[in-house]
C-alpha cells in the first residue's frame, strides 16, 4: 500500500465514521458549488451570444473625395498594420453607388441627383481577440480619424458601448459569485474539518506520543477537504448538466461549460478544500503542539 | 541511555508547585528500573520527561543522543519512535482493531508493504497471545488483553527504551503478572525498561533497580539482589 493510498483510506475512514456530518457538509458544498456552476453556465452562454455580436464589430472609414489612389494604397497599408485589425476592404465611389442602387431596387441615383454623392470608404473588421476587448473600437476610430485623407469614421457606438458595459457587469457578477462560493466553501469545510479533528483529539494525542509527525497527522484531514470538494464539485457539475438538458428543450442552443472550465471548476474546488483544511487543522494541531514548540524557543 | 541532571519540573497552572525537585538519575542500557511512589509523587512526570512531553524548568534530560537543551520540536517524533510507552489506561485507538492499532505505528515509520506489516504484527500478536483477537476493537477486549495490545504496540518498532506508567493499575493479579512477564522478556532482550508503579511487591519481583519518589524528590535508589529479582 502506498503512503498516499494509506492517507486516502484514513481520510475515508474519518468521513465514514461521521457519516451524518459528512453528508451535511457534502450537501451544503454541493448546493454552493451548484449555484456557482449555474452562474458560470449562464455567463458562458451570454458570453457566447455576445461574441457573435462582437464579431460584427467593425469600422467604416469614409475618405475625402479627392484622395489620390497612391494615398488610398498608403492608408490601406497603414490600416492593415494595426494589430487589432483583422480585415480591410476598400470600396470605391463606383462600388458604393452600385451597392446602394442594388439596395434601392435599381433606382438610378446619378440620374436623380445629377452626380454620385457617395464617398470612397474602407470597411475594417477586428481580429476576434481585439473584438473581445472593451474600448478597442473607440480607440481605433479615434486614431484612424486623425489620418490625412480620412473624412469620417463610423461605428455602432451606442450598442457596442452597451454590449461592453453588459459584458463587464457579467464578468463582475461571475467573479462576485465565485468569491462568495469560495468563502462559503472555506467556511463549511473549515468547520467540518475542525469538528472531525476535535472528535479525534485523543487519537491525535496518542499518535503524537507514539511518534507521528505533524505531517502524518495532518495529511488525512487535508485529503478529507479535497475529497469532499471533489465530490461536491462533480455532483454540482452533474446537476448543472441536467439543468442544461432541461433548458435546451425551451432554448435550443444553450451550451454546457467547456471541458477546460469543468476541469478548472473541479481543480479550483479541490484546491479550495485543501486550503480550507489547512486553515482548520493547523491551529488545532499547533494548540496540541504548544508544549513541543516551547522546546525550540 | 537516560539521564536526569538536577531536573526541576513545575506543574502548569497558577500554583507553580514543583512536580519534581532537583532530580538527578542515570539509567543505563538494559536496566529494568521501577519508580515507586504514591499518587502525585512525580512518577508520571518523570516518564513524560523521558518522552519530552514535558520539558524541565531547570536542569537537563538526556535520552539516547537527544538532549532537552538542544532538541528541536521536529525531532520529537523521531525520539518518540525509539521509545515504547505503555499506560495504565492503555490509550489504544478505539476506532481501530488490535491489528490496526499496532500496524499504525509501523506505517508511521514507513513500513507500508502489507506482507511485511502482517508478518511483524501477527508475530507480535502471537507473542502477547492476542492472535485470535487481532480483528477485535479495544472495547471488545478485557483490561488485560488491552494492556497486552498496548505492549505489542509499544514494542512493534523495536524500541530501545520501554516506559510503562502504572501498567497493571487496571488489571487483576493474573493479568498484571502476564504484563510484567512480557516487560521482563523485553528487558532481557536488551531494552531498557522503566516502570512507574505504586505497587512495591511488583518491584520486589521484577526490578533490577528501584527508585522511590516522594513529593517530587528521589528518596531512595537501590539495586535489587539477583535472588530477589528472579524469585
Image (cartoon, rainbow, N blue to C red):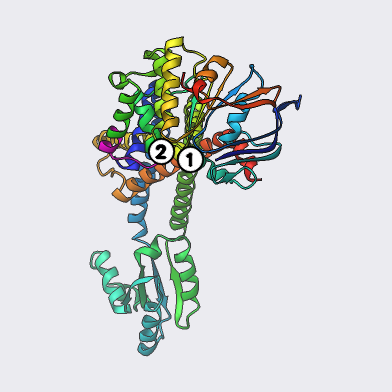
Please tell me which residue is depicted at 66% across the width and 19% down the height of the picture.
B40
Dot 2: few (<14), some (14–19), or many (≥20) neighbours within 10 Å? some
Residue at 43% x, 20% y is B179
Q: Position of residue B141 (x, y in %)?
A: 38, 14
Q: Chain of mark 2?
A: B
Residue A223 image offset from top left, x and y in percent? 40, 38
Query: Toward the viewer: A152 or A51?
Result: A51
The residue nearer to you, when weighing A141 against B197, is B197
Q: Disc 1 to disc 2, how far (Cα)?
A: 8 Å
Circle 2 — which element?
Answer: helix
Query: Any magenta on residue B24?
Result: no
Residue B143's place in the image compared with B92, above or below, is above
Residue B198 appears at what percent x and percent y?
Answer: 59, 17
Q: In the image, which disc is placed on residue B216? A: none
Of A126 and B178, the residue lying toward us = B178
Tell whether position B111 is magenta: yes
Quadrant position of the C terminus of chain A in the picture: top right
Tag count: 2
Residue A111 visible, this angle = no
According to the image, label 2 marks what residue? B108
Residue bounds of the magenta highlight:
B109-118
Position of residue A174 in the picture relative to residue B119 (left or right): right
Q: Quadrant of the N terminus of chain A?
A: top left
Q: Nearer the viewer, residue A187 or A14?
A: A14
Q: Which residue is mark 1?
A: A213
Amino acid at each position: 500500500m502506498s503512503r498516499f493510498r494509506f492517507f486516502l483510506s484514513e481520510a475515508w475512514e474519518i468521513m465514514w465514521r461521521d457519516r451524518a456530518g459528512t453528508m451535511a457538509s457534502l450537501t451544503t458544498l454541493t448546493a454552493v458549488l451548484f449555484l456557482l456552476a449555474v452562474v458560470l453556465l449562464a455567463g458562458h452562454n451570454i458570453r457566447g451570444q455576445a461574441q457573435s455580436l462582437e464579431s460584427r464589430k467593425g469600422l467604416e472609414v469614409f475618405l475625402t473625395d479627392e484622395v489620390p489612389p497612391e494615398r488610398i494604397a498608403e492608408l490601406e497599408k497603414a490600416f492593415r498594420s494595426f494589430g487589432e485589425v483583422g480585415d480591410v476592404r476598400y470600396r470605391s465611389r463606383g462600388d458604393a453607388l452600385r451597392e446602394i442602387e442594388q439596395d434601392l431596387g435599381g433606382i438610378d441615383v446619378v440620374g436623380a441627383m445629377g452626380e454620385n454623392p457617395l464617398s470612397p470608404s474602407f470597411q475594417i473588421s477586428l481580429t476576434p481577440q481585439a473584438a473581445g476587448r472593451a474600448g478597442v473600437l473607440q480607440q481605433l476610430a479615434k486614431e484612424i480619424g486623425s489620418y490625412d485623407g480620412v473624412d469620417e469614421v463610423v461605428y455602432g457606438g451606442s450598442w457596442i458601448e452597451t454590449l461592453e458595459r453588459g459584458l463587464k457587469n457579467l464578468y463582475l457578477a461571475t467573479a462576485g459569485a465565485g468569491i462568495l462560493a469560495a468563502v462559503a466553501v472555506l467556511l463549511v469545510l473549515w468547520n467540518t474539518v475542525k469538528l472531525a479533528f476535535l472528535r479525534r483529539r485523543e487519537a491525535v494525542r496518542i499518535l503524537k506520543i507514539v511518534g507521528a509527525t505533524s505531517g502524518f497527522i495532518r495529511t488525512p484531514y487535508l485529503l478529507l477537504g479535497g475529497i469532499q470538494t471533489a465530490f461536491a464539485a462533480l455532483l454540482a457539475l452533474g446537476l448543472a448538466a441536467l439543468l442544461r438538458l432541461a433548458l435546451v428543450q425551451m432554448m435550443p442552443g444553450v451550451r454546457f461549460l467547456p471541458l477546460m472550465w469543468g476541469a478548472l471548476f473541479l481543480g479550483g474546488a479541490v484546491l479550495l478544500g485543501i486550503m480550507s483544511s489547512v486553515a482548520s487543522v493547523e491551529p488545532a494541531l499547533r494548540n496540541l503542539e504548544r508544549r513541543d514548540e516551547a522546546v525550540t524557543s | 541511555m537516560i539521564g536526569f541532571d538536577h531536573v526541576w519540573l513545575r506543574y502548569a497552572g497558577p500554583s507553580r508547585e514543583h512536580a519534581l525537585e532537583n532530580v538527578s538519575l542515570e539509567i543505563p542500557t538494559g536496566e529494568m528500573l521501577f519508580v515507586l511512589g504514591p499518587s502525585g509523587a512525580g512518577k508520571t512526570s518523570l516518564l513524560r520527561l523521558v518522552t519530552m512531553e514535558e520539558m524541565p524548568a531547570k536542569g537537563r534530560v538526556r535520552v539516547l543522543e537527544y538532549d532537552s537543551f538542544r532538541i528541536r520540536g521536529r525531532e520529537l517524533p523521531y525520539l518518540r519512535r525509539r521509545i515504547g510507552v505503555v499506560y495504565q489506561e492503555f490509550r489504544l485507538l478505539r476506532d481501530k482493531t488490535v491489528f490496526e492499532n499496532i500496524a499504525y505505528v509501523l506505517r508511521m515509520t514507513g513500513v507500508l508493504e502489507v506482507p511485511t506489516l502482517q508478518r511483524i504484527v501477527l508475530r507480535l500478536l502471537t507473542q502477547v497471545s492476542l492472535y485470535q483477537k487481532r480483528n477485535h476493537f479495544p472495547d471488545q477486549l478485557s483490561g488485560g488483553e488491552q494492556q497486552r495490545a498496548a505492549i505489542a504496540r509499544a514494542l512493534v518498532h523495536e524500541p530501545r527504551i520501554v516506559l510503562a506508567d502504572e501498567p497493571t493499575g487496571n488489571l487483576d493479579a493474573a493479568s498484571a503478572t502476564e504484563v510484567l512477564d512480557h516487560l521482563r522478556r523485553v528487558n532481557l532482550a536488551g531494552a531498557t525498561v522503566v516502570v512507574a508503579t505504586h505497587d512495591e511487591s511488583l518491584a520486589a519481583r521484577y526490578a533490577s533497580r528501584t527508585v522511590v519518589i516522594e513529593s517530587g524528590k528521589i528518596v531512595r535508589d537501590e539495586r535489587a539482589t539477583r535472588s530477589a529479582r528472579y524469585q
